[in-house]
Amino acid sequence: MIYFDNGATSFPKPRGVVEAVHQALTRYGANPGRSGHDLSIQTSAKVYEVREAAAKLFGVEDPSEVVFTSNCTHAINITLKGLLQPGDHVIISDLEHNAVLRPIHALSQKGVEYDIANTYGRSRKTLDSFYRLIRPNTRLIACTHASNVFGIRQPIEELAMLCRDKNLLFLVDAAQSAGVLDIDAPCMGIDFLCTAGHKGLYGPSGTGLLITALGSSLSTLMEGGTGSFSANYEQPLDMPDRLESGTLNTIGILGLGAGIRFVRERGLAQIYRHEMRIAKEIFHHLKRMPQIKLYTPDFDEGSHLPVLSFNIRGMSSEQVIEALSRQGFALRGGLHCAPLAHKKMGTLEQGTVRISVGAFNTREQALKLCEAIKKTCRSS
Amino acid sequence: MGNATILISSVTAAMRAQRLLEQRGIRSYIRKIANHPKLGGCGYGLEIAGDLTSALYLLQAANIRILGIL
């Protein structure tokens, strides 16, 4: 099977990740931050190393600003539900994943108000669109770094500046961009950076990160044991304990640490260049096939991530996925949990076939995929 | 008399403190502290094998919350 579904979760995982998971299961099996025996302290030290690595990757000085979560959705929910109060107003983009849309929508039933800004890629027009929606009670802008369906990047740096200027908080959903683009959260003005650990960071499933200096000010989604202040009935304010109740996913976290190491060693710029070269090659091949419908006129570094969507005229996205699966290719079809993005592009009914490139994909695989798509077109 | 132990809220803060002291040449050991009133229950301590005053100064400068000294 040739895997082009890295936007859902990356596969295969680097050898180091497999080894780290094995080590977690066979060597660092104690509960970190709970006991005082050597194995618990050693396991805590391994977990802390990952916290340090994540902090460094995202430009954060204090590793206690790194919160381990189950996934990106978890990180987003912690932030939105811990921050927003009835009467607050939020602006989101028209490319948001349900990870942002659904919690915001749920909060709107409890008195939080929201608007959806039309976006036009990394342009002034996108910025103006957000600007026009700001109200006196706007508290937050929550925006994806790049669409998980179409790979379209958003003007994150400029939106952060707008937030600073208007005294708003800024949440970035970096599920698709972490490990692909360079993100320095404090430098870029991101207050809440939410990401998956199992996509571009190559960690195991069940890992995610919330990076924030404002964790102590959030209300908690979950309360429970933290190994600290244990006689107190109230959840501690200290970070990361405030937002990390219950036993940590040591196995996932140590695997994530190895994934981050892989990304750092290979280099973000090198990963992005490699993946974009493959994605662009596929895009240009598809552009020459008359039966293929693409959704962006071009596909370039700067404006896109290596994630692209297409359809074959006369076939549903699921039919295409099935046909490609029979030929040995793993892609994803449907709505990709992002109905807003499909509404914007007019693909809400049909969905799209998504190709998401990873660090282990090769040009040869891309050419084989294009051949298989061509064959599928002929048989439609 | 044994080494002094600086009481710190959580294992993460203790790890951060230990790394910081290590960089300045001060060795320390992380100990679990069971149910101490200054910790509001269980927590962690950093046993200092070196100059306590310097250690305290460095930790305070790094905004690491010190909850007491044993």
Image: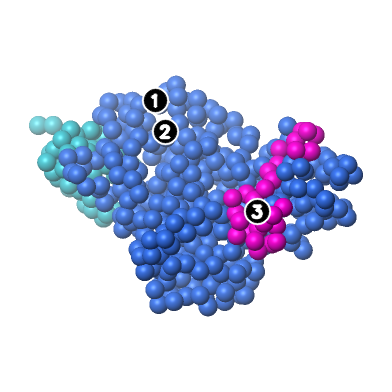
> Which SS class for mark 1?
loop
Q: Position of residue A375 (x, y in %)?
A: 87, 41
- Residue A54, position as x, y percentages in the image: 46, 46
Q: Which mark is residue A250?
A: 2
Q: Which mark is residue A29?
A: 1
Q: Quadrant of residue A120?
A: bottom right
* Residue A300 in sight in this render: no
Percent position (x, y) of residue A360? 68, 39
Query: Earlier along the polypeptide chain: callout 3 or callout 2?
Result: 3
Q: Secondary structure at mark 3?
A: loop
Please give the chain letter of the residue carrying mark 2: A
**In which chain is the residue bearing label 3?**
A
Mark yes or no: residue A69 visible: yes
Specify whether disc 1 shares its chain with disc 2.
yes
The amino acid beneath tag 2 is Thr
Which chain is tinted blue?
A: A
